[in-house]
Amino acid sequence: MFRLSILTGVSLCSADAPASAESILQAIACNDRIDEGWSLRRREGLFEGKIKVYVQNIKQLDMIIHRINRIKGVIKASWVATSE
């Protein structure tokens, strides 16, 4: 069976990167494919990151963002367009 996947991105801001990183990966574990595009940097005491993920529809993307936003220490997660 052929499944269409769309490459998209999730941007996030966290107050606690080490504790949040594993939880974030678990939040997107429902997804089959995570692109190699994972970046996290510290800026003004906060951690900012972007994750490229393959999703099959908007509902799946919304679910991933909702799960990330519920993680302790995450200030905000949202959709971002990808260049690829």
Image (cartoon, grey):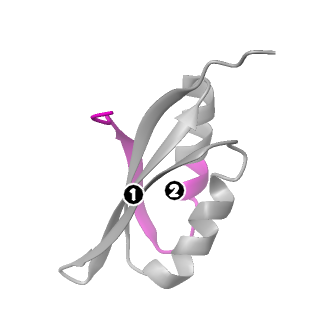
Q: Quadrant of the N terminus?
A: top right
- Neighbor class of circle 2 (other Cα within 10 Å; few <14, some 14-19, many 20+) is many
- Residue that badge 2 annotates: 69
- Residue 12 at x, y percent in the picture: 38, 58
Instruction: Please tell me which of labels 2 and 1 falls first in the chain.
Output: 2
> Residue at coordinates 32% horizontally, 36% vertically from top-left?
82
Left or right of residue 8, residue 34 in this image: right
- Residue 80 at x, y percent in the picture: 33, 39
Tag 1, which secondary structure? strand
Tag 2, which secondary structure? helix
> Residue at coordinates 55% horizontally, 82% vertically from top-left?
19
Circles 2, 1 touching at the beta carbon (< 8 Å): yes
Queried whether the magenta region covers residue 83, the answer comes back as yes
Residue extent of the magenta highlight: 66-84
Which residue occupies the foreground of this view, 32 or 12?
32
Q: Is residue 6 above or below residue 47?
A: above
Q: Residue furthest right?
A: 1
Left or right of residue 55, residue 46 in this image: left
Queried whether the magenta region covers residue 73, the answer comes back as yes
Q: Residue furthest left?
A: 44
- Residue that badge 1 annotates: 76
Q: Is residue 25 above or below residue 65?
A: below
